């Protein structure tokens, strides 16, 4: 029995949509937003400007491993912030869910995802969360490891296990070099955390591993399987491997619901009703607990750093299928 429960008629007890309906809503959402030209590629990581802006893929992966897709679902892009909940899951697996609350925090900051002000404002509290940069760098530092290489190997294997990859996923080295050499803001964040005793390893080591984590290459299909693993209570639907403790999944989904869409998280939950995580590489994954995950990728971002095509497609699919965790959201 899953340790994940959802509220309302969109919850785990509702009848699952028929396969033809899942494929239909994916096809319709892809067709509806394929031509949308709003937004632009992220440019603060220089190489992300080179990702073809017309790429767009949409995927649903169910808890029993069935895949429904349309568009560019196998193109490899950098995972960026979509990696954050999965490294938080590794920390929870090693040390229990309380460690996130005690040593990082689980509160929405109300500030941009890369804010240094959040650390200074709340320096005496654990009032960031593992889905913004400060909390994510701290989460990397909390992974129990014997060395920097061991820390990295564990993080890479964990994300690969969530994706159901038979071999470890690979880092997009050009993205890593571009991001690491321009990561002045994140370097400041790591040092501020260390100054306030909220970082738990060497700051530069945490920066290197965190940046490498964000540079892992994934596809929309990979993200959908990662989300479906959460929907399936921590068991990968393809490999059947338990990747996360079932009892920890609700806490992680709660943080994704309140902070997964940067400073648009409230609006996202209000209109889509699903825990989700977004990244500036253009990927988004949303979880329907106990049932399936919806992922999408397109590099054009809005001002908050969220993929315009992907968020519209996922929101429409959630509305069409009536799967918001608090009940069906308006279409």
Image: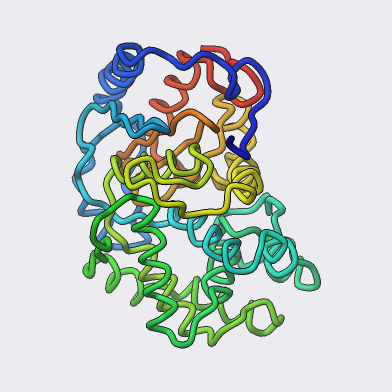
190 or 323, nearer to the observer: 323
Q: Can you say whether 272 is above or below 117 in the image?
A: above
Any part of residue 263 in sight: no
Which of these two is toward me, 251 or 130? 251
Q: Is residue 27 above or below residue 44?
A: above
Residue 184 placement: quadrant: bottom left
Depicted 184 relative to depicted 148: above or below: above
Taking the image as shown, residue 264 lies to the left or right of residue 326, namely left
Which residue is pictured at 31% across the width and 47% down the height? 41
Q: Is 19 left or right of 252, judged from the image as shown?
A: left
Where residue 152 appears, x then y in whole percent?
39, 75
Q: Position of residue 314 (x, y in %)?
A: 42, 28
**Residue at coordinates 30% horizontally, 56% vertically from top-left?**
78
Quadrant holding the N terminus:
top right
- Which colour scheme appears in the figure? rainbow
In the current view of this chain or complex, which residue is farthest to the front?
Answer: 1
Count of numbered marks: 0
Please give the name of the residue rendered at 36% of the width and 42% of the height, measured from the top-left corner: 225
Does residue 279 appear anywhere in the picture?
A: yes
Residue at 59% in and 59% down: 130
- Residue 293 image point, x, y percent: 43, 33
Toward the right, the furthest residue is 124
Residue 127 position in % (x across, y down): 74, 61
Work out whether 115 lies above or below 164. Answer: below
Q: In which quarter of the view is residue 13 placed?
A: top right
């Amino acid at each position: 029995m899953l340790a994940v429960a959802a509220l309302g008629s969109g919850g785990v007890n509702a009848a699952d949509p028929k396969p033809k309906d899942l494929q239909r809503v994916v096809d319709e959402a892809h067709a509806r937003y394929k031509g949308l030209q709003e937004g632009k590629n992220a440019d603060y990581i220089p190489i992300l400007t080179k990702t073809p802006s017309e790429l767009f893929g949409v995927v649903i992966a169910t808890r029993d491993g069935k895949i429904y897709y349309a568009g560019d679902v196998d193109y490899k892009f950098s995972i960026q912030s979509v990696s954050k909940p999965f490294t938080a899951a590794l920390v929870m697996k090693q040390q229990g869910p309380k460690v996130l609350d005690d040593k990082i925090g689980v509160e929405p900051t109300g500030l941009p995802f890369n804010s240094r002000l959040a650390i200074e404002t709340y320096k005496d509290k654990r009032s960031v969360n593992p889905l913004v940069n400060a909390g994510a760098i701290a989460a990397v530092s909390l992974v129990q490891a014997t060395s920097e290489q061991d820390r990295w190997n564990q993080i890479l294997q964990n994300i690969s296990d969530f994706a159901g990859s038979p071999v470890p996923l690979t880092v997009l080295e050009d993205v890593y070099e571009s991001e690491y050499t321009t990561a002045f803001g994140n370097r400041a964040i790591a040092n501020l955390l260390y100054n306030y005793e909220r970082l738990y390893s060497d700051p530069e080591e945490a920066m290197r591993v965190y940046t490498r984590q964000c540079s892992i290459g994934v596809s929309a299909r990979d993200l959908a399987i990662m989300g479906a693993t959460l929907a399936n209570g921590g068991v990968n639907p393809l490999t059947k491997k338990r990747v996360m403790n079932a009892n920890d999944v609700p806490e992680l989904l709660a943080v994704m619901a309140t902070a997964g869409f940067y400073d648009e998280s409230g609006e996202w939950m209000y209109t889509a009703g699903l825990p989700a995580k977004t990244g500036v590489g253009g990927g988004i994954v949303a979880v329907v607990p106990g049932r399936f995950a919806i992922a999408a990728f397109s590099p054009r971002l809005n001002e908050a750093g969220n993929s315009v095509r992907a968020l519209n497609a996922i929101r429409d699919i959630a509305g069409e299928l009536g799967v918001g965790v608090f009940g069906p959201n308006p279409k």
